[in-house]
Image (tube, coloured by chain):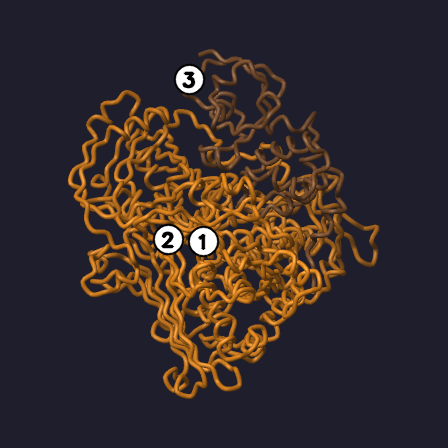
Amino acid sequence: MKVRVTVNGRIYERDVEEHKTLLRFLREDLGLTGTKEGCGAGECGACTVFLDGKTVNSCMVLAVEADGSSIETIEGEAEDGKLSIIQEAFDHRHAVQCGFCTGGMVMSVRELLQRTPKPTIDQIKEGIDGNFCRCTGYQQIIEAVLEASGQAELADKGGLKYV
Amino acid sequence: MFENIKTDDLVHVGKYERRQEAVAKISGDAIYTGDMVLSGMLHAMVKKSPHARAKILKVDTSRAEALPGVRAVLVGNELDYKLGLYVVDKDILAKREVRHYGEAVAAVAADTPEIAREAVDLIDVQYEPLTPVLNHVDALKPGAPLVHPDLGSYDFVPVFSPQPGTNIPNISKVRKGDVEKAFSESEWIIEREYTNPSVQHVPMETHVAIVEWKQGDNITIWTSAQSPFTVRNLFCHTFKLPLNNVRVIVPYVGGGFGGKAGIMLEPLLACLSRKADGRPVRMRATREEEFSLLPCRSALTYRIKTGVGSDGKILAQQLTLYWDAGAYADYAVNVTRASSYSGAGPYEIPNVWLDAYTIYTNKPYGTAYRGFGHVEFFWGLERHMELVARAIGMDPYEFRMKNLLKPGSRTITGELISEHTGSPQKCLDAVAKAINYGSLTKEEAAREKRSGRKIGKGVAVLHKAPAMPSFTATAAVVKMNSDGTVNVNVGLTEIGQGSTTAFAQITAERLRFPVSKVKVTVEKDTDRDPYDWQTVASKGLMLTGNAVILACEDFLRNAYEVAAQVLRAQTVDLDHDGDKIFVRHRPESSVTFAALSVGYAFPNGNAVGGPLVGVGRYAAQGLTNLDKETGQGLPALDWTFGAHGIIVEVDPDTGEYKVLKVASAFDVGRVINPDLVRGQAVGGMIQGLGTAVCEGYIYDEQGHLLNPSFTDNKIPTAKDLPEEIETIAVQVPQVDGPYGARGVGEHPMISVAPALGNAIQHAVGAELLHMPIRFEDVWRALRDEEPIDNWITKTPTGSCRSDPATRAHSPDSAAAP
């Protein structure tokens, strides 16, 4: 079946088998491998992308369902070679370890900040609750979100202490 | 090395530094093995056993082979190879008998994943189910069915002790002093048994590899692995190939936690590629396969008997560890060994009798997992110290302080503790202060009154040394480019721990270069990088860090030699900065590193030197094998000590609880990068909290794994974070560590669970002996009822909080099932 989508502002048209997920379509047909599969069951959030302005687990959406839609992935997060505010904060705050969850995590954070420009810590936790991270323990991610939302002073409290 | 320089006098070490490879990861550019596509690449899938133990009567692959697009089908009987890290006990595909639920019995490589899946469905396997050996303690009983009747014929590494005719692939022992006499002299003797189930590592990236077996037995392996040289070594051992026939490449790795330490999918994919005329064959494990085809962390039953003198000093301990290896020995035998020399904790104990058994059962097999046994046995040990202290009427903090190792103490294997070994006391003291141990603050008292819930505080200590061969070694190579920047190659893999960045900082410090001039290569390649044993055990920072320093020294020596010729000076008169080498007493006489980098050319065209390279090699110093009968010897490269303090709020009626604060302290010797230390500390602590609160494998009585998914096997999410987290670094320098540093990769996960159990007991009095601590376990303990052992169950009741609907409404008051 023919599918026409806009991904990160570029138009793609491909023949797709009906059973193919949006995740596999992005990775295998379009070569956009920044979006990862962590479980294939909509549980872990590693495959989070924007579909017409809302985040979805792309492993739970068929590519044919996305026909005519606008999709945004981690590859579209930086603009003109410049990291976005969220990416910059993730880098600055060591919110990345193995990096496998990071693409999906950044997508969820972007949606959170679009909805709630200055989230509380509880709202941040709620906003990234669907994105598993096994490495960081989330703390430095939360601090990065605070920084990205102009609340760096709240993030500064958590640093390493020395005795 | 350089352990006595004050951090204030250092430029890069101990300072803020961004992660080297962060931008590649944040932008989606980093290529992991599963992102790769090779020309002609085939896709593999395996047929898995639905039984825990069964005879394989017949495997019919004819229909699969006839399916268009199928390029290779394999069954166990075609493959005459054995695999194994320490005890060579595993077939590439099961032959004659399957030994655990989810074990691979046949495999297919096909043009597409869809065809591979269809082909696997067309394979018909006939089984005769047998009664599985599920309970590891029962597996020791006389007459128990043998998981490996051929154990006596297997090859094994001689530091281990397989017991043919039993289910025991290894026993490790420690004998120190006279335990019987010491018990007879003890004022108190306290004995308990502690347990925990198997758990899964859950790297976000499941296991994935691509292998191609070309003509002339030239093999290339791309794999998400922690230890490329170990993959190569074991692979060549199995297939009897020269090491330089096999090239192992490790792209970016999406987390390991020990689960990717050994050799996994690679041999199977190699055999499929060979059968498919050398086409590259790829397999990526599904999340369900991650739980059952691939290994987990072993379950443990730990029986501890402690004798204490009238002054509160521990006189004797009798320790028995029953490790559930599952179907294959893999790392479990070495976890067992580590749990022998380390199993009494950071305490001074004059009389010890320790037996640690590795036990085969018909369950998915255990492997290395962050902490390498210590998370499991410290659950029992630090709960036990709490119970002993309470039983003898001493404050648990004071009891620990009285018995902790200190300079002049000897460990249970006879190692002398010195001023430089590190300080468990400082760690314990730091976390006790951080949680205001011993009393409630005004706010806490008010909160208790307001909520009707009880607030409790508990502490637990920990230690761990790298579990590794005594002769573990590594190397580093520093190579200069013609613009004066350097590339550093090490064999240690970057799996998210951040060692790449730490090595860049160490390189920059030693060379006096800005970090921006240093690139430590992330992707590993056994054809290109110098050897490293494995990326495990929290030994990377210390061993590879030292090798990096030595490579820098060698590099500078080589650079100075050429500069001396160029400047017509003796090397002793030379010095350098980040840009150039100069004559100390005449600094205007200088030559840039860039001019020396690939050989210096004089104005008339003559050249000296050549591309600047520095090589550093480092091997663990002074370690010995352990005596097989007494366990005595020197196993520890270094001990990293630590402690956690936890404040918890418990509902005394329901057993529900909420973690309010976790404070963690580790004696890291020297902080190389504060944010990396905190990343390990918090990440490990939360992973430890997952183990403490809810994670665990649940089987039915036939040995089927009931919860191989995130629906039924929860890991912590952001909403599971404690309200407050505090991370504290203690810095008693390690004399032979790089700038005095020790590893801290695994330690944060250890002893989180007992600190939580101790805090819950302090709050409401529940005596908890089983981990994880589910709400219903607290509830039952409060009623002095035995815990329900539903880890092998007739009635599958998921792990705690398995109902997502409950969690969505109120994370604070999630009801236990």
The chain displayed brown equals A
- Circle 1: element type: loop
Residue underneath mark 3: A18
Are the residues under marks 2 and 1 on the same chain? yes
Return the residue nearer the eye: B426 or B583.
B426
> Would residue A55 be visible to someone looking at this image?
yes
Report helix, strand or loop for mark 3: loop
What residue is rendered at 39% in x and 66% in y?
B302
Residue B366 circle label:
2
The 10 Å Cα crowd at callout 2, few under 14, some 14 to 19, many 20 or more, is many
Question: The disc numbered 2 marks a residue on which chain?
Answer: B
At label 1, which amino acid type do we have?
Answer: Tyr
Circle 1 packing at 10 Å, graded few (<14), some (14-19), many (20+), is many
Q: Left or right of B369: which side holds B665?
A: right
Q: Chain of mark 1?
A: B
Q: Secondary structure at mark 2?
A: loop
Residue A13 left/right relative to B278: right
Q: Nearer the viewer, residue B470 or B454?
A: B454
Cα separation between marks 1 and 3: 40 Å
Q: Which quadrant holds the N terminus of chain B?
A: bottom right
Residue projecting furthest to the top = A2
Q: Give the percent coordinates (x, y) of residue B656.
A: 52, 54
Q: In the image, which disc is placed on residue B369?
A: 1
Give the residue drawn at x 61%, y 33%: A108
Q: Position of residue B59 (x, y in %)?
A: 19, 36
- Drawn side of residue B434 relative to residue B465, left or right: right
Q: Is the C-beta separation of discs 2 and 1 under 8 Å?
A: yes
Q: Which chain is orange?
A: B
Q: Look at label 2 and name its amino acid.
A: Gly
Mark 3 or 2: in front is 3
* In this view, A93 is above or below B152: above
Do we see residue B638 in this rendering? no
